[in-house]
Image (tube, helix red, strand yellow):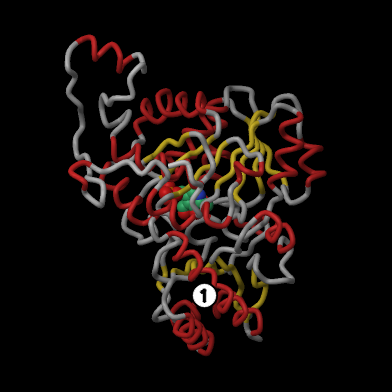
Amino acid sequence: MSKEFRFDTKAIHGTDFKRNPENALNPPIFQTTTFVFEDLDHVEKVMSFESQDYVYTRGNNPTLRLFENRLAELEYGKGAVAFSSGMAAITSVLFSRLQPKDTVITHKTLYGSSYNVITNILPKYGVNYKIVDLTDIEELEKSIDESVKVVYFETPSNPNLSIIDIEKVVKISHEKGIKVVVDNTFATPYFQNPLLLGADVVVHSATKYIGGHGDALGGVAVSKDEKYIHYLKFDYMCEFGGVMSPFNAWLMLRGIKTLGLRMRQHEKNAMEVAKFLNSHPKVKNVMYPGLENFKGHEIAKKQMRGFGAIISFEIEGGTKNLEKFIKGLKLCQLAVSLGDTETLVEVPSLMTHRGYPKEKLEEFGFSENMVRISVGLEDYNDIIEDLEEAIKKI
Ligand SMILES: Cc1ncc(COP(=O)(O)O)c(C=O)c1O
């Protein structure tokens, strides 16, 4: 099929319209570790990559390939690699692009484990890092030297929704031969396509919106560079062993079918919740890219097709009130993770971002008492009523 379908259609059908075995509507789960060769001639063809046939599920598997192709299509890449988790994707991409004495530049806020990898783990292998406010392009320009090989960031960033101008970062980085890697977990390919804005690699925690139901871990890296995808798959994913299971690939493919539908409703709910929080006298510092007074709103409008469904905010009155508020929630669940059908609430300084130095949180752009909410797919009136009841408890 040569017709270019729209997002929702591609998410359900893909673009190649290949029939599944036995004409099944849904693909089977190829629950196998290994694949049988015809003879040694077949072995030679497959091992030398002359044939696309399969060897061993740690390297490839038909269910994983379907998931990888679907993500490559939705992110406008030429190929993708599926991983066992978002962190497996992120660490493999960073290790594949960095060597001792290289430097990686990252933004002030990013997911706690990614921050830990960049500031604690990579330095053990001789890789240096610089933390830069990437919303300030001049600061990026000033911090580049010959050792910088990768600029890595999330936009919107976790947990304070910083919006980083992807095109501007790409322009400056590419002039110096630096690769740009974007974690697109919060936006999903439905709202943003970093590869179309020039990024070299896109990574996702597929555990979040892509799977969408809080029941499967997964990660993926997508690029327009087929050679790089081959290298990432066989030198890093396959050798580090962080492969996605066939069952999880199948769950992800099922989740992707409703990605557009879910994201539209997530965003609608989030906008209502953000407006409610923003107008509540006991709530301050509401961070949501869809709010017109939010710092990154104009850039978000330019590079995204929607604002997502993660909101951060503070409750007036410090830790004591925060504790009462959290205790007062009934519908919204206190849990890490995001992008599920259920509304999840967490306190980053105590949970996902515990590794950030406490005394420096404000410098990084968030506070000890900040709350992050992943607005789910319940009726938004019920979510708002739950938040309202909990705020009454303070
Ligand atoms: C923005 C972002 N990137 C990556 C990850 C890591 O993903 P995973 O838990 O699938 O390893 C997370 C997890 O919360 C995240 O929020």
Against 103, residue 68 (above or below) is below
Q: Secondary structure at mark 1?
A: helix
Q: Judge whether 348 appears above or below 250 on screen.
A: below
Crowding near pointer 1: few (<14 within 10 Å), some, many (20+)?
many
- Which residue position is annotated with label 1? 269
Residue 59 sits above or below residue 354 on the image: above
Q: Nearer the viewer, residue 59 or 328?
A: 59
* Picture residue at 54% right of the left edge, 73% below the top: 268
Residue 55 is left or right of residue 274, and the answer is left
Q: Nearer the viewer, residue 209 or 99?
A: 209
Find out if the beta carbon at label 1 lies less than 8 Å from the nearest ligand 1 atom. Answer: no
Question: Measuring 82% from the left and 44% from the top, which residue is drawn there?
Answer: 138
Horizontal side of residue 331 vs 78, given as left or right: left
Q: Position of residue 281 (x, y in %)?
A: 66, 86
Q: Is residue 372 left or right of residue 297?
A: left
The answer to whether 37 is drawn above or below residue 392 in the figure is above
**What's the residue at 21%, 49% (across, down)?**
24
Question: Looking at the image, can residue 203 be seen?
Answer: yes
Which residue ends up furthest to the front in the rendered image? 2
Please state if 379 lies on the left or on the right of 57 as rendered. Answer: right
Residue at 72% across, 42% down:
169
The percent position of residue 90, horizontal first and vertical second, equals 49, 39
Q: Position of residue 307 (x, y in %)?
A: 60, 64
Say what amino acid the circle numbered 1 marks. Asn
Say which of 365 and 259 sits in front. 259
Return the x and y of residue 100 as percentages of the image width and height. 59, 22
The C terminus lies in which quarter of the figure?
A: bottom right
